[in-house]
Image: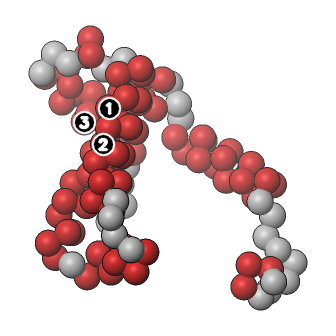
Amino acid sequence: MSVDLNALQARLRSFAAQREWQPFHTPKNLSMALMVEAAELAEIFQWMTPEQSLAVRHDPALKEPIADEVADVLLYLLQLADHAGVDLAEAVENKLVKNAIKHPAPLNTGKNGR
C-alpha cells in the first residue's frame, strides 16, 4: 500500500476543522503531542530484551497496540509538518543526503567495516 502524504495531511486538516481543533493545532502543541505518542510507543518496548523486541512482529497481542501508537506518531508528525510548512518529501530527501555525508558507508564490505 502506498500512502499519499499530501492527501493524508488534507484529511487530517479536514478532521481537525470538523471538530474545531485548529486553535489547538499549533506547531508547539503538535510537537508535544508527538512526543507523548512516541513515549507511549516506547512504553510498549520498555522492559523487553532486544530479542523480545525483535519478536513482536510475530505476537498478535502486540500488533494492534504497536500499530496504533505508530499511527499516532505518524499522524502527529504529518500535522506538525503541515502546520510548520515543511515539505516532507523535500525534507526527507535533504536529510538522506546529509546523513550520507555525515555517515559514509565503510569501504570494507565486512560487518560494520571491520
**Residue for badge 3:** 11
Q: Residue at x 36, y 17 (%)?
A: 26
Q: Earlier in the sequence, mark 3 or mark 2?
A: 3
Q: What secondary structure is found at the residue carrying circle 1?
A: helix
Observer-side mark, 3 or 2, equals: 2
Q: Residue at x 35, y 54 (%)?
A: 42
Label 2: few (<14), some (14–19) or many (≥20) C-alpha neighbours in 10 Å = many
Q: CA distance from mark 3 to mark 1?
A: 18 Å
Give the label on residue 84, or none: none
Give the label on residue 37, or none: 2
Label 3: few (<14), some (14–19) or many (≥20) C-alpha neighbours in 10 Å = few
Q: Is residue 72 above or below residue 83?
A: below
Q: Residue at x 60, y 41 (%)?
A: 90
Q: Is residue 37 above or below residue 63?
A: above
Observer-side mark, 3 or 1, equals: 1
Q: Is residue 62 left or right of residue 33?
A: left
Residue sticking out furthest to the right: 107
- Tag 1: residue type? Ala
- Tag 2: residue type? Glu
Q: Are marks 1 and 2 in contact (CB under 8 Å)?
A: yes
Q: What secondary structure is found at the residue carrying circle 2?
A: helix
Q: What secondary structure is found at the residue carrying circle 3?
A: helix
Q: CA distance from mark 3 to mark 2?
A: 20 Å
Q: Residue at x 68, y 45 (%)?
A: 94
For residue 66, what is the image quadrant? bottom left
Point out residue 59 in the picture as x, y percentages from the top left corner: 21, 78
**Residue for badge 1:** 33
Q: CA distance from mark 1 to mark 2?
A: 6 Å
- Tag 3: residue type? Arg
